[in-house]
Amino acid sequence: MEAVREATPTVSRSRPAFQIAEGDLRPESVAYDPQRKHFYFGSMTKGKVVRCSAAGECQQFASGLGRVLGLKVHGNALWLLSNSDRESALLQYDLASGVVVGRFAVTGADHLFNDLAFGPSGDVYLTDTPAGAIWHLEKDAAGLTRLPGKFEYANGITLSPDGSLLYVSAFPDGIQVVDLRTHTVAPMEHRGDLCLISIDGLYFYRAALIAVQNSVMTPRVVRLVLSRDLRAIERFEVLERRNPWFDGMTTGVVIGAEFFYVANVQYVANVQNEKKDGFQPILMLRVPL
């Protein structure tokens, strides 16, 4: 343990952005509306989505949902992934009215829609973790189609700027690169001293991938600098590690030249579904890119 700590010293670049008073919200993901300057958080336990200002003032946006995971704002719509024991659904909400204007679902208990990403033409791609699948909603299509290939424990997902390459974090240690023109899948090459396990959030930023790694390793945020063809990792940089505010850190969103992310989902709970020392406010951190 001493050797591990020496090899992974604290890296502290993040600063508090704002707090959410509802500490037991259990948000897994966050979305941002650049036009209205609003943040959106889903709840894994309360079946709802809240809309918050940059000062942390929040109000309910949607309710009656299942376990809400991935969220993204695209144009004038909020897209989210809602999961129940019966089905997993991709929902499209009009931001102005809060009305559902699109719904695309698959049935069965062996699905869990986890995260989503948009291509430049408006296509949606989303991960289905237990099924090891990637689903595709072509713009203006009536339903989801499944991409070829198996993606064990598929989680984080993002695309290259031209929409030709899809990046998917997969189990046990790697990022799969999908060429959407040929539908070929290959593991992303990387250095032997780089661990890619437990990537929850994955984001493309200026010829690099920003990755949130949590779960069974030291929680951290890393920048993965890509090769010229965007198919391999040439070097990496730890942006944040061993932050004392971390208590179940999870995904985030790139805003300008900063990455905003949730520091303390606070997963650890007792049998009453309450933390022994009470829930603290949800803290959003920001780290410069």
Image: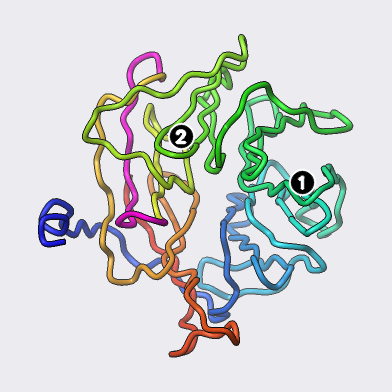
Measuring 49% from the left and 27% from the top, which residue is drawn there?
A: 176
> Considering only order in the chain, which callout, 2 or 1, is on the residue closer to the N terminus?
1
Q: Is residue 191 left or right of residue 129?
A: left
Q: Secondary structure at mark 1?
A: strand
Name the residue tied to disc 2.
204
Choose top left, top right, bottom left or bottom right for residue 150: top right
Name the residue tied to disc 1.
90
Measuring 55% from the left and 21% from the top, which residue is drawn there?
A: 178
On the image, the x and y values in percent for residue 60 come to 72, 72
Q: Which one is nearer the viewer's eye here, 21 or 11? A: 11
How crowded pointer 2 is (Cα within 10 Å; few <14, some 14-19, many 20+) is rated as some
Q: Nearer the viewer, mark 1 or mark 2?
A: 1
Residue type beneath disc 1: Leu
On the image, the x and y values in percent for residue 289 come to 33, 44
Is there CB contact under 8 Å for labels 1 and 2? no
Residue type beneath disc 2: Phe
Q: Is residue 171 left or right of residue 96?
A: left
On the image, the x and y values in percent for residue 227 come to 33, 19
Q: Which one is nearer the viewer's eye here, 33 or 128? A: 128
Q: Which one is nearer the viewer's eye here, 233 or 108? A: 108
Q: Quadrant of the N terminus?
A: bottom left
Residue farthest along the top direction in this orientation: 182
Q: Is residue 166 above or below residue 74?
A: above
Q: Is residue 77 left or right of residue 233?
A: right
Residue range corresponding to the magenta coloring: 215-230
How crowded pointer 1 is (Cα within 10 Å; few <14, some 14-19, many 20+) is rated as many
On the image, the x and y values in percent for residue 199 come to 44, 45
